[in-house]
Amino acid sequence: IPSWMWNMMALEELNLAATGLTGEIPSEIGTSLVENLKVLNLSFNSLTGTIPTEIGALTALEKFWVWNNGLTGAVPSEIWGMQSLNELILRENAFDELVIPVTGNLDILTYLDISECNLESTIPTELGNLVNLERLDLGNNKLIGAIPTEIYDGLVNLKVLNLVQNRLTGPIQTNIKNMSSLQELYLRGNSITGTIPSEIGELLDMRALWLDLRELTGALPSELGLLKKLRDLYINNSEISGSIPSQIGDMESLEALSFENTKLTGVIPTEIGNLSVLKELDLENNKLTGTIPTEFGNLSVLTHLFLGLNDFEIDGSNTFPNVTNIVTLAVLDLKSALRKDISDNFMIPTELGRLINLIRLDLTYNYITGIIPTEIGNMENLEVLSLSNTWITGIIPAEIGNMVSLKNLDLSNMILSGNIPDLSGLIDLRTLTLGNNSYDDASYDKSSLGISGEIPGSLLNLKNLTVLALLNNKMTGPIPSEIVGLSNLETLLLSGNDFTGSIPAEVANMASLHTFKCKNTLICGELPPAMLPDSNDKVWIELSLPPNLPVC
């Protein structure tokens, strides 16, 4: 930083952000003539060393921003005596100490950000003296201990409190109710224990509440329903148990509701259908039972619905089709959600084709029967289709070839038969998994099971394909040498089919291919040199071949 800058007596604002500065902040900053300086921005540079104690001489300074540098050492105590300062942003540095003197005079400070600074200490109780503070961000440090009582009792004007990704312990205290101005509370990624205090329902201005705390226990307090202004509620990855209180349906401003990976039980309250502006609902990986409420059909702006890894009962003629009325849906995840003994006759409804905005559909690991409806081809925006590990039968409908946005198609471990349809229009397809459709069950005619026919030429045009898994079906014919045109192919699984002929040398030499399986086929002839056991031509992650190939 040029020394001449500190002689500009009339200077009120100095913005040197992202200018490539290196070296240290000079101590001359406090003995200079810039006594009228109000704004100093040194962010997004490569400054090192410590903040000089002389910074305290800038008595007119209102905003000091020095984030995203390489500053180290302690945050100088002199900063806390700068009576005009209202914004102090020190984030993304490497400070090792934060000490606030009891006699600090930062009475008008409204914004304090010391996040991502590698701080290893407790939260200073003196922060509670910053009575006009509106935003406090200490996230992504290594802070330990409990949140001080002084924070709850003193910061009555605080609107945003961010303490994410630290090592904080202890409970959320009941006197959190004293933070009556609080609008956003972020505590995820700590070791905070205990229950969610019912007093949290007294924070009537709350907009965002993130309590992803793995050691959080107890039930969800019904008082959450009092937070009428709350938009985001995330209580994931915790030991929270009991049922979802029906009062959740009173949170009329809620846009995101997530209780993923907890211990919740019971049924989904029908009152959730009252959340008319809800966009994201995530109840995945709980122990929820009962039916998916028909009232979900009222969630007219819902875009993300995660209900997988639960134990729901599904009435295919009523409940599930009602979900398909939500045409705004972009993600529908029901993996391993349906009880086998209840959903024996459950089939994918044709109404699913209404969801033309869907990007991801996951129905894996469910006792779903019937066929893949042709209407599924209406989903031209779908990128991920996963129906694996179901009891779906029949052929792969040709209409899947209309799903031009598809990137991942998983129809493995099903009971499909027939040929692979023309998929040449799926030019963005990355993974195609059709393996294990030759289901071994006495109730099925095994001779008609499994995908059959040759590897179709349409697959050889999918230049973005990285995984092609066709194993354990009834496919025949040679391995086409044209497969070498799939220049991004990394994994090729052909085992357990009736392929004939030899392995083309061109396939073995594909630069991107590192996993190849071709056991239990009718392949014959000599192995390509790159696949011989003593070959140094290529490094394979996995190469599975029959021990002795017959002569062709």
Image (cartoon, rainbow, N blue to C red):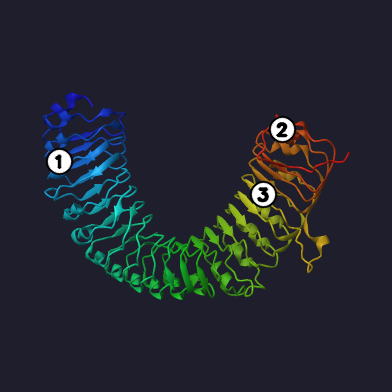
Q: Amino acid at mark 1?
A: Glu
Q: Amino acid at mark 3?
A: Leu
- The image shows residue 298, relative to residue 422, as above or below, that is below
- Check disc 1: other Cα within 10 Å, few if <14, some if 14-19, many if 20+: some
Q: Amino acid at mark 2?
A: Asn
Question: In the rendered image, which quarter is residue 321 located in?
Answer: bottom right
Q: CA distance from mark 1 to mark 2?
A: 67 Å
- Check disc 3: other Cα within 10 Å, few if <14, some if 14-19, many if 20+: many
Give the residue number, with chain letter if any, for mark 1. Answer: 78
Q: Quadrant of the C terminus?
A: top right
* Picture coordinates of residue 482, whole percent (x, y): 75, 37
- Residue 12 appears in the figure: no
Q: Are marks 1 and 2 in contact (CB under 8 Å)?
A: no
Q: Are marks 2 and 3 in contact (CB under 8 Å)?
A: no
Q: Nearer the viewer, residue 274 or 339?
A: 339
Observer-side mark, 3 or 1, equals 1
Give the residue number, with chain letter if any, for mark 3. Answer: 432
Give the residue number, with chain letter if any, for mark 2. Answer: 509
Label 2 sits on a secondary structure element that is loop
Q: Residue at x 51, y 74 (%)?
A: 293
Label 3 sits on a secondary structure element that is strand
Q: Nearer the viewer, residue 99 or 321?
A: 99
Q: Residue at x 25, y 57 (%)?
A: 159
* Picture coordinates of residue 18, whole percent (x, y): 31, 33
Residue 479: mark: none
